[in-house]
Image (cartoon, rainbow, N blue to C red):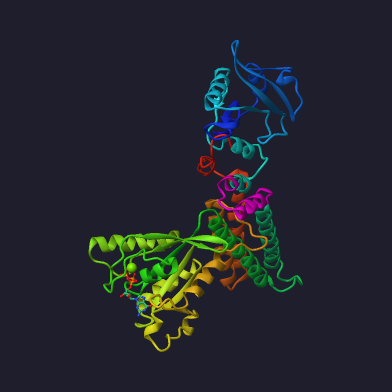
């Protein structure tokens, strides 16, 4: 259990391996100061020092000097993990770092696992899951925007939003239940629908900002989908501006997933070309279709390609259904071959007309993707998969709450929505989720 591990003193280098001007070794846990005093000799004992003080001295291996160092002392609860903590600033030679680590292990410290310092900050309640995730995001961010938004997250923006959602749903449930319980009282009519709609809009906004956040960190995953031969590979090449995927007039040309990077103003897209979706008989074709569907399931955004020369066919219907659960855009390709692309107004979609071959309107599609990756004021970017999934299910519950006709059913859906959200606090976060997250950190963080 995680709580047992909190008794250990842990040690780790907090700077990368290799030669540098300075290297830092971090130590924390209940007996930190006493242990460090066994290897460090300065003007003062570390255990006699106040917190937030620096002292210089020597790291000694018996009588031998290993290094002349500066030690920073943090006293519980005023440290990163809320425990007593020491940071040693050493000369940046990996041999010195290793020796200091060994000495500390000899006096009883344990080498920390990746992310264990941040995990302790979480287990001691100094930061919540979202903030821990933001620490990771700040380390991993590839752009300055990514770092800005990680900092916003570290201050707890998402947690505040989630608390707000929970309290508004609670009010809704209370009002609905009051009306159900005291129908004879002169209570106002059920006016929950517009409130739920507004909540749903805000939840979807937060979810969209996660996608934008991901695009800042690793690129938004955009998957091109369509029947065989509609021009997916041609469009893939047109968007990338290079002949990456093989194009032929033969249906079934693409089988493997082909991936390319698109740099857009405000973010990056990982674009996937896929095999055409059709009933497959031969094993390689079946595997190709399975792979395409897998990519669609993992995608952040879909581009559904319809062929303007064949018009809308029954198989396209299945593709449009995917857009009920995932954001995306529909395009009519091959408009160079038709006078006017067919209207799909009865399906309430308005496809973007383009020609991948003649490169017509490719800029409009790129602009649509740019909109999807660009940040907005007030974006909340960082959520782990668990939180994303939680908000996805919350959106589904709110949607079904809106769809039902009766007040008692609406109250039931909202109560279930609340049930989902209580998982956001410490008590129900499982060890598996913790481990999945903290092992993605580097050592010493
Ligand atoms: N006229 C016209 N032909 C196009 C256009 N886009 C693609 N094509 C042609 O359609 C054929 C199929 O194109 P691909 O890009 O290979 O189609 P695909 O959807 O990747 O096909 P599969 O990989 O087999 O599923 C090729 O002969 C392309 O030249 C277009 O905008 N206009
Ligand atoms: Mg293809």
In the rendered image, the vertical position of residue 442 relative to residue 309, given as above or below: above
Highlighted range, magenta: 136-156
Residue 50 placement (x, y as % from top left)? 77, 26
Residue at far bottom of view: 339
Residue 267 placement (x, y as % from top left)? 55, 60
Q: Nearer the viewer, residue 391 or 292?
A: 292
- Predominant secondary structure in magenta? helix
Determine if the magenta segment contains residue 101: no
Q: Nearer the viewer, residue 284 or 45?
A: 45
Q: Residue at x 61, y 50 (%)?
A: 424
For this view, does 406 lie left or right of residue 288?
Answer: right
Determine if the magenta segment contains residue 154: yes
Q: Quadrant location of residue 337?
A: bottom left
Q: Residue at x 71, y 74 (%)?
A: 189
Residue at far left of view: 282
Q: Quadrant of the C terminus?
A: top right
Q: Quadrant of ligand 1?
A: bottom left
């Amino acid at each position: 259990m995680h709580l047992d591990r909190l008794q250990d003193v842990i040690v780790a280098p907090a700077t990368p391996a290799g030669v540098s001007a300075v290297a830092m070794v971090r130590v924390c846990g209940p007996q930190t100061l006493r242990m460090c005093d066994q290897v460090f000799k300065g003007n003062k004992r570390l255990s006699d020092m106040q917190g937030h003080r620096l002292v210089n001295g020597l790291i000694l291996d018996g009588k031998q000097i290993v290094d002349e160092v500066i030690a920073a002392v943090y006293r519980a609860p005023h440290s990163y993990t809320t425990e007593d903590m020491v940071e040693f600033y050493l000369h940046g030679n990996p041999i010195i770092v290793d020796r200091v680590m060994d000495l500390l292990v000899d006096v009883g410290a344990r080498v920390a696992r990746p992310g264990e310092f941040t995990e302790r900050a979480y287990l001691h309640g100094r930061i919540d899951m979202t903030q821990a995730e933001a620490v990771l995001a700040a380390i991993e961010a590839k752009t300055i925007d990514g770092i800005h938004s990680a900092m916003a997250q570290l201050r707890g923006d998402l947690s505040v939003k989630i608390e707000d959602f929970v309290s508004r749903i609670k009010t809704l449930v209370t009002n609905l239940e009051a009306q159900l319980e005291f129908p004879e009282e002169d209570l106002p009519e059920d006016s929950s629908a517009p409130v739920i709609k507004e909540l749903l809009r805000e939840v979807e906004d937060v979810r969209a900002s996660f996608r934008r956040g991901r695009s800042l960190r690793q690129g938004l995953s955009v998957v091109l989908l369509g029947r065989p031969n509609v021009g997916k590979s041609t469009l893939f090449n047109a968007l990338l501006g290079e002949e990456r995927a093989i194009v032929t007039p033969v249906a079934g040309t693409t089988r493997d997933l082909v991936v390319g990077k698109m740099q857009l103003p405000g973010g990056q897209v990982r674009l996937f070309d896929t095999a055409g979706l059709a009933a497959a008989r031969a094993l390689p074709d079946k595997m190709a279709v399975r792979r395409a569907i897998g990519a669609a399931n993992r995608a952040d955004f879909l581009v559904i390609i319809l062929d303007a020369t064949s018009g809308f066919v029954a198989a396209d219907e299945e593709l449009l259904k995917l857009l009920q659960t995932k954001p995306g855009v529909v395009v009519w390709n091959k408009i160079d071959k038709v006078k006017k692309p067919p209207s799909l107004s009865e399906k309430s979609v308005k496809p973007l007309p383009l020609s991948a071959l003649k490169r017509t309107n490719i800029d409009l599609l790129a602009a649509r993707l740019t909109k999807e990756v660009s940040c907005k004021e007030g974006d909340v970017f960082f959520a782990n998969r668990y939180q994303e999934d939680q908000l996805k299910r919350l959106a589904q519950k709110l949607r079904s709450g809106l769809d039902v006709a009766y007040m008692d059913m609406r109250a039931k859906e909202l109560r279930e929505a609340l049930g989902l959200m209580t998982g956001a606090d410490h008590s129900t976060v499982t060890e598996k989720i913790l481990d999945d997250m903290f092992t993605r950190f580097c050592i010493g963080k």
